[in-house]
Image (spheres, rainbow, N blue to C red):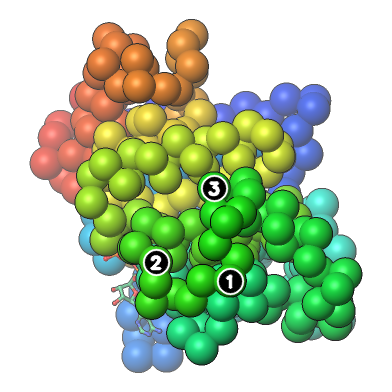
Amino acid sequence: MNAQAAKPVATTAHTRPLVVMDHVTKKFSNGTLALQDMSLTVCGGEFLSLLGPSGCGKSTALRIIAGLGGVSGGSIDWPSSRINSKGLPEGDISFVFQEPTLMPWQTVFGNVYLPLRLRGVTQKAAATPIMEALSAVGLGDFANAYPRELSGGMKMRVSIARAMVTKPRLLLMDEPFAALDEITRQKLNDDVLDLWRKTGITVIFVTHSVFESAYLSNRIVVMKARPGRVHADFPLVTASERDALYRSSEDYRQACEKVSAMLLEAMGDAPEGH
Ligand SMILES: Nc1ncnc2c1ncn2[C@@H]1O[C@H](COP(=O)(O)OP(=O)(O)OP(=O)(O)O)[C@@H](O)[C@H]1O
């Protein structure tokens, strides 16, 4: 393991831990050991990208962080959340999947209403937060449209609005833009960054794309293949704004190179300590 890179990123006095995975192991009932000894602390305000070889356990880790899957060993804690009687965090974590998973029989408004409806919020009381969430993703004029009338990128925006409508503190995104064309993907990258800056939300973003992770994140965690665990954990600090200019900067090229080298190392394709 690259000892320097694997050092956990230091937290500051301003950022409280939202999630603490402590030596987590996950073994599925069929015997697959997906995670072993995975430790990760995520603090408020971070934009963390999680990368790693296919099947290394990124989605499994994300599901555990969301409280959607138990651990077989070690522990998971949400120190800043209200914990319910099942020991799970309540209300302040949202998930965006690769598929937008919209209800085709509901309008955009109806789809974004879902999480509030499940909490017993009336449609009248939900109208303002729904319209705010739609405006934040540029879909203020599409509240009455049906999913079949939307492009792939617009469907994903609805999915993001649905995740944001409850004003979560932590947004988990599992390869959300992998199925989109490059230009749409870049636009959505900018939109998510904009949401992150404006709301101060914490984001954990699973991606296979070195370029995407280097563009979006202020922290990169690279996992090693199976059983999954943290191979490298480092900040990505840049003097410039993340924008179109950044994409052609030397800063960005160097960030991509670093992430790429860590990924190759995690896959065993480069000598340790690269
Ligand atoms: N419910 C399950 N039951 C048994 N094995 C599972 C289950 N879910 C995942 N796995 C296995 O656990 C390992 C990790 O899977 P996971 O989907 O977390 O990896 P990943 O890094 O997200 O993969 P990818 O990059 O391909 O999306 C894989 O070998 C997968 O087959």
| Above/below status of 66 relative to 271 | below
For the N terminus, the quadrant is top left
Sequence-first disc among 3 and 1:
3
Eye-nearest disc, 2 or 1:
1
Q: Residue at x 22, y 30 (%)?
A: 261
Eye-nearest disc, 3 or 1:
1
Quadrant assignment, res 167: bottom right
Sequence-first disc among 3 and 2:
3
Cα separation between marks 2 and 1? 11 Å
The amino acid type of the residue labelled 3 equals Gly
Q: Report x, y in % for residue 85.
A: 86, 81
Q: Could you say which is closer to the camera, residue 157 or residue 128? A: 128
Q: Are marks 3 and 1 in contact (CB under 8 Å)?
A: no
> Disc 3 marks which residue?
138
- Report the side of 159 relative to 223 (left or right): right
Q: Residue at x 56, y 30 (%)?
A: 9
> Disc 1 marks which residue?
144
Sequence-first disc among 2 and 1:
1
